[in-house]
Image (cartoon, rainbow, N blue to C red):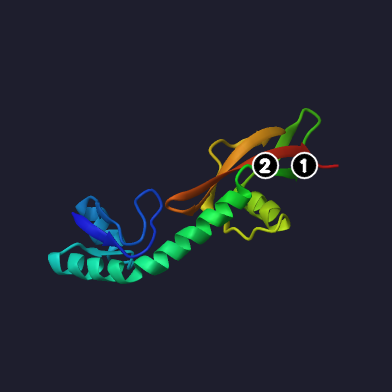
């Protein structure tokens, strides 16, 4: 079934995208929770008109996201974690810790926008991706060290 997303849905699409999903997922989850509407002809026409009116606003949002992405692209964050004598971290480094380190560096980024591909359980160098906009991503270098 074709639906129009009313908000960003992780691993599915962004707001105002027209996507095809299985009937049960659309009818039982996306539509009742208000995350999507059925993509009928009239809904598609309304969407096209709304997108036309919001094009200017969206261009500014995209430019702002690209500006922030350029500022934080390639930045190296040092994150301290409690470790054992062998260098293994108690627990793991997660997106909350990365968001806190970014806040200390002067960038207020929501932790939900940060993704770390591999689980960080040892001291070393890693990378994280920040999705600021559907067309603006930034890669951050993480340097995980042992806390004293």
Report the residue marked by disc 2.
91
Q: Is residue 49 left or right of residue 7?
A: left
Of callouts 1 and 2, which one flags the residue occurring earlier in the amino acid sequence? 1
Q: How many marks?
A: 2
For the N terminus, the quadrant is bottom left
Which secondary structure lies at badge 2? strand
Report the residue marked by disc 1.
82
**Residue at image coords 30%, 57%:** 17
Extreme residue in the left direction? 41
**Residue at image coords 65%, 49%:** 98
Which secondary structure lies at badge 1? loop
Tell me, yes or no, whether the two marked residues, 1 and 2, touch with CB atoms within 8 Å.
yes
Among the 4 quarters of the image, the one containing residue 90: top right
Up the image or down, 103 lies above or below 137; here it is: below
x and y, in percent, of residue 23 in the image: 20, 54
Up the image or down, 74 lies above or below 21; here it is: above
x and y, in percent, of residue 113 in the image: 52, 53
**Residue at image coords 28%, 70%:** 50
Among the 4 quarters of the image, the one containing residue 123: top right
x and y, in percent, of residue 32 in the image: 29, 67
x and y, in percent, of residue 59 in the image: 42, 62
For the C terminus, the quadrant is top right
Question: How packed is label 1: few (under 14 Cα within 10 Å), some, or many (20 or more)?
Answer: some
Please state which of residues 83 and 12 is positioned toward the viewer in this rendering: 12
Among the 4 quarters of the image, the one containing residue 9: bottom left
Q: Is residue 110 left or right of residue 101?
A: left
Q: Is residue 35 left or right of residue 147?
A: left
Please state which of residues 20 and 86 is positioned toward the viewer in this rendering: 20
In the rendering, which numbered label is found on residue 102?
A: none
Question: How packed is label 2: few (under 14 Cα within 10 Å), some, or many (20 or more)?
Answer: few
**Residue at image coords 28%, 68%:** 52
């Amino acid at each position: 079934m074709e639906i129009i997303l009313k908000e960003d849905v992780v691993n599915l699409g962004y707001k105002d995208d027209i996507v095809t999903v299985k009937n049960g997922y659309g009818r039982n989850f996306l539509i009742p929770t208000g995350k999507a509407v059925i993509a009928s002809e009239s809904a598609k026409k309304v969407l096209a008109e709304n997108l036309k009116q919001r094009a200017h606003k969206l261009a500014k949002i995209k430019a702002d996201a690209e500006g922030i992405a350029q500022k934080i692209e390639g930045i190296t964050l040092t994150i301290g974690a409690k470790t054992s004598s062998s260098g293994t971290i108690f627990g793991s480094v997660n997106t909350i810790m990365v968001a806190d380190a970014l806040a200390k560096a002067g960038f207020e980024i929501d932790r939900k926008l940060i993704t770390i591909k591999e689980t960080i359980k040892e001291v070393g160098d890693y990378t994280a991706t920040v999705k600021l906009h559907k067309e603006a991503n930034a890669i951050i270098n993480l340097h995980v060290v042992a806390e004293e």
